[in-house]
Image: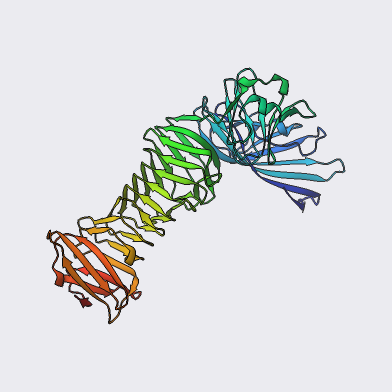
Amino acid sequence: MANASFTDLAGNQGIGKTVNNLSPAGYAGQPINLGLTDPLQDGSLVTATVKDVPSGWIIDGATLNADGSWTLETTSPHGLTVTTPADYAGAAVLNVSMSWTNGDGTTGSTSVADNVEAYAPGMPIFAWSGDDVLTGSSGNDLFVFSQPIGNDTVHSFDAAADKIDLIGYSGFASFADVQTHMADDANGNAVIRLGDGQSILLDGVHSSALTDGNLVFDQTPVVNNAGTMTIGDGAMLPLSGTINNTGLISLNSAGSDTLLQLIQHGITLQSGGQVVLSDSDSNIISGTSADVILTNVDNTVSGAGQLGGGLLSLNNQGTIVATGTHALVIDMGANTTLNSGTLEATGSGGLMITGTLANSGLLWANGGNITIDGQVTGTGEATIGNLSKLEFGAASSTDVTFAQNAAGTLQLDDSFDFSGRIGGITNDDKIDLGDMLFGAGTSAAYQADSSGNGGTLTVTDGAHNATLHLLGIFDAHNFTLVDDGAGRTVVEYGLTASGLVA
């Protein structure tokens, strides 16, 4: 919270406060507490104005203004709630401002960016990795708290029906463990202290009302999404567990950081749905720690943005495709990315993979470039087509095929340690040896193998040799070496361009 003095148009002095990143959560179609605090604590009247409210949402008890904002006067801002349409699922940022007159005649104000998360009825409610305010429904609710959280408050917790799932908390494996860390606060609310500054407060519920039926431990949550789950520009939504996604999960950044936060122990995407990221660098799918795992069984993840951000582990068995004019960046930090599915680029922004990749699936540069800066291992394959480039920044064992009429480029920045085979090369394709300078001493020699369906092309600059294993039938005299314009050696085949011919 930051303070700033101001003078209004009438010359009145005041103090303004700005609070960021409140993240209340609840169920679509039912009131969700906005997590506001009373600025005065003396019952004085406060005027609250809520802007950027999506169509169909209602600020309960407030008046809808002509400009789309909502206003009400209240002595209890902490009770202010929002109700989304019953068929909504996702998150959006509401901008809340409050103003009041102090006892000495001065005015005060505060503003809040309120990230509202609304889950479909029957789904779990997930706490994110910071302070949170969660609101239950009239049904049987499951509140999921995964290490780490902040200091969280739960409203409308029904001790007769609701459950808390504690995930990843060492020392918490039974209700008896919880009891040793639970007590009522001064207002009679049960508080569970999880260590490291993390806590759960159950508003209006005494600790004596809880039983072992209210707690589960390391239970994998299950989310069923047959519709659309939308994360708006600048918003954040936490998820974990098994995601049976037959519908659409959409990240709609228009320039502000828009986060799908995967909490312990990560998610398993299955059931053939889609995860679509808008064409923005600011879409982010990331974990709360580097050991959180995203397993994509069969979903198609497409668009642009950041996947991982160094805080995730990825096991892709489905399809991930970069479709935007902005890049899709896969960054697993020190973790090795696992791919047994398809990693594809069709957009001009391309696909960038940092770190190491264990590939038993397909890499497909299909109208967009793919750049991998770490080592690539495994028995997987790669295809280059549609005027695209595939760049290996380190050693690779991947077999690469140029599609028909690809006019593509294979760039090997560590050509000396490239052990894959190269097939389909014709007179419109190039192999760019990024670690071999082009000059008078650069030459190449081709030797067909005994099968007659391939051979080895050895390229040397006089000091270093790169051996390329080619598939196909070639004329040894039709290989040409040229400068790529940056002083590096490029291998071409079947061209009459000037250069050094073997």
Q: Is residue 107 above or below residue 242?
A: below
At x 74% / y 31%, what residue is drawn? 76
Whole-percent x, y for residue 243 in the image:
45, 33
Q: Is residue 373 left or right of residue 237?
A: left
Q: Residue furthest bottom?
A: 440
At x 83% / y 34%, what residue is drawn? 42
Q: Residue furthest front?
A: 450
In which quadrant of the rendered view does residue 212 lie?
top right
- Look at the image and tell me whether residue 326 can be seen: no
In which quadrant of the rendered view does residue 224 lie?
top left
At x 49% / y 34%, what residue is drawn? 241
Q: Is residue 255 left or right of residue 101?
A: left
At x 30% / y 73%, what residue is drawn? 489
Q: In this view of the protein, which residue sits in the foreground, 192 or 32?
A: 192
Q: In this view of the protein, which residue sits in the foreground, 151 or 413?
A: 413
- Look at the image and tell me whether residue 448 can be seen: yes
Q: In this view of the protein, which residue sits in the foreground, 320 or 68?
A: 320
Whole-percent x, y for residue 274 in the image:
39, 38
Whole-percent x, y for residue 482 in the image:
26, 74
Q: Is residue 252 above or below residue 432?
A: above
Q: Residue furthest top?
A: 160
